[in-house]
Amino acid sequence: MTDISIQRLRKAYGNLEVIHGIDLAIEPGEFVALVGPSGCGKSTLLRMIAGLEQISGGDLFIGNLRMNDVPPKDRDIAMVFQGYALYPHMTVADNMGFSLRLRKVAKDEKDRRVREAAAMLGLENLLQRYPKELSGGQRQRVAMGRAIVRNPKVFLFDEPLSNLDAKLRVHTRAEIKSLHRRLGTTTVYVTHDQIEAMTMADRIVVMNAGNVEQVGTPLELYDEPSNMFVAGFLGSPA
Ligand code: ADP
Ligand code: MG
């Protein structure tokens, strides 16, 4: 069984179609990277999976449920954004517990899950701080903590490392991978950095101008890029 099944998925803004009928199947536990140049439709595709963008055509299934018209809060998905979007007026603990409160999870259970996630991410001593009192790397971890506490079927990441400096990026990459190994949650990870994709993903989806150019393991793509675009993109510096 697939965890995410995308069938002939299309997206148009007004008359402008930006996703042109994409097919993709993601297996349980897979770490899949969506890569491609800026503007090729990575975020749009991810946001359709999350339910943050209306689908213009085709079908989206999570497990075997058709999700086209299901609101974001009823999808078993947690998304980590580029800018983290933490609530500035809430402590780290409240930021991490907020989505559970929305879903009426009992306080004890909520506190337990927040503590567990904080321990996993090394945030135990920062739970009473506010976002403005944290470094960029710490904020990034709170954003991940917010996703982890939900224990969702699917994690979606949209360029989660782009606000970090080079050293912290390498460190956080490893941290995300080790969380994935530990939790085994199906993950779709958007990046415009092909090296990040190559080092992190089980399979890579190379996108260009609203289409999928190729899907394969990092080795498959290196060994046999299916066309000039894929070869050029993978061979270019980040
Ligand atoms: P990426 O994440 O790969 O950089 P996006 O998914 O953000 O690309 O954008 C894909 C295309 O859709 C781009 O041409 C972008 O200009 C367009 N686009 C994205 N969001 C909107 C919007 N809200 N209204 C109109 N066009 C949009
Ligand atoms: Mg984007």
Image (cartoon, rainbow, N blue to C red):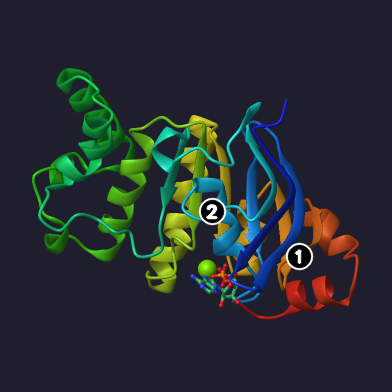
- Which picture quadrant has residue 148? top left
Quadrant assignment for the C terminus: bottom right
Mark 2 or mark 1: which is in front?
2
Mark-to-mark CA distance, 2 and 1: 18 Å
Locate residue 81, reporting x and y percent.
40, 58
Q: Which residue is mark 2?
A: 54
Mark before the other along the chain sequence, 2 or 1? 2
Which residue is found at the position 43% from the left and 33% from the top? 74
Please give left or right for residue 124 compared with residue 5 in the image.
left
Q: Callout 1: helix, strand or loop?
A: strand
- Residue in the image at 44% along x and 69% along y: 162
Whether residue 36 is visible to the viewer of this picture, yes or no, is: no
Residue in the foreground of this view, choosing between 92 and 10: 10
Q: Is 47 above or below relative to 97? A: below
Residue drawn at x 88%, y 77% as measured from the top left: 228
Classed neighbour count for the residue bearing mark 2: other residues with Cα under 10 Å, few (<14), some (14–19), many (≥20): some
* Residue 75 shows in the view: yes
Q: Which residue is mark 1?
A: 211
Quadrant of the image where one finds ligand 1: bottom right
| In this view, 30 is above or below 22 | above
Q: From this viewpoint, which residue is outermost toward the front? A: 15
Name the residue: 35% across, 65% down: 83
Q: State which quadrant residue 108 falls in.
A: top left
Residue 175 point in image, percent of width and height: 44, 48
191 left or right of 134?
right
Q: Type of residue at label 2? A: Gln
Nearest the eye: 65 or 205: 65
